[in-house]
Image: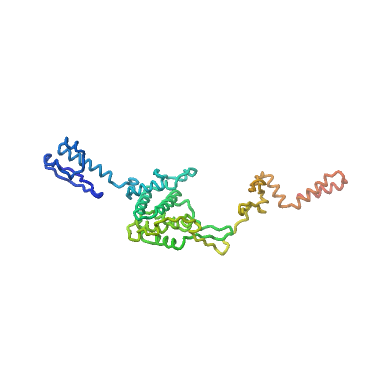
Amino acid sequence: MINLKIYPPISNGHLSIGPATVSSPSSVDDTNTDLPNVDTATVTHLSPLARQLSEAHTASNELQVAKPILAATNSPLPISAIGRELMVARIFRGHEPPVSLDSAVDAFTFQARCSFLNYEDRALVSQMYAYAQSQGADLAYVDSVAEVLGRYRYFDDGRRLLSSNNGYDSQGHAVRYDFLEKDAAAAARILNGTAISTTSFDQGFLRHILDPGIGALSSFGNSIGFLEKMVMKFSSEETEQSLLGREFKTYVPMDVKDNVVVTRSKEVMFTLPEPYITRNNGVWAITEKGREAGYTLDKVTGRPRIPTPVPEGQARVRDSVKAHPRQVQERVFLEALARSRDLPHWLMSLLKTLSKAGER
């Protein structure tokens, strides 16, 4: 008796594999039509047992084709073929590059931010494309999420990006940036909800982009509602709340100024030093401090010119003249008189004495 593993035809993407018993080569029915399709001419010239082995090999090949495409062998997230095709077409312009690892090395070379998406990111993005398309949502929402996720990876998981909520305006008032009320509410639900603990999204990324000092100025605010749906969809808490409604049928881009709340402190929190140069409505001007430092305006272009560095010795003389302008002028006057030939000898001697006394 011979034991074989027979691979029956694939049905609805599932395959049952188990032992089968063949009593003898002659017991196999040559007219069995339930086995996978193979070439008829080949079957005619095979023994029943060899034919069975051939059919098992054919079914095994079909299994390999039917397996879900993976972004990488170490990725736990399967990708539908449709989702992956959409991802490659929309964010990689038809050709998926390998994962870029170090943006600092290529700081002076243009690289698309999305090329820094790792394999798990790409698997998740592909799933989002497939789901959004099945729900009739505008795929630009997925583009938006993929873009900020790629930017997060590009800047070393956000470590090289600083929050904008630590700055001041030109008058020294502290400035704070926030999401619009509806977007702030969605961000709070994501960060304080239970789905964040089981979602396929990188939790570090979610906390990064939902920081108002980062996300409010990234033109991502109008996508936070969509992100909330995706966080829930790809978590263990998937519910009807992850369904995409009509509000996601059309993506409407928004300018940052229309998508952010700016708050300035009433008090001056930081005193800025007087600048050397200013520019108002495209017109450059040199301040008094700038003129003292040697800045000038180019008569042709109207642009400021940086002063030429002064040698150290000349700089000390110039500083001395600035510190004692009156004494210097008096000494120069006395020295000029002392060099005059029309003065009496006694007066010339007196002027030289006074000049030397002024140097002390």
Report the side of 315 relative to 110 (left or right).
right
Q: How many marks?
A: 0
Q: Residue furthest top?
A: 45
Q: Residue furthest bottom?
A: 266
Position in image of residue 173 (x %, y %): 56, 61
Please, which colouring scheme is shown?
Answer: rainbow
Q: Residue at x 41, y 56 (%)?
A: 250
Image quarter of the N terminus: top left
Report the side of 329 relative to 75 (left or right).
right
16 and 330: which is toward the camera: 16
69 and 330: which is toward the camera: 69
Position in image of residue 273 (x %, y %): 61, 56
Position in image of residue 347 (x %, y %): 86, 48
Report the side of 288 relative to 4 (left or right).
right
Position in image of residue 255 (x %, y %): 49, 56
Q: Residue at x 42, y 56 (%)?
A: 223
Please determine whether, in this image, residue 109 is positioned above or below residue 254: above
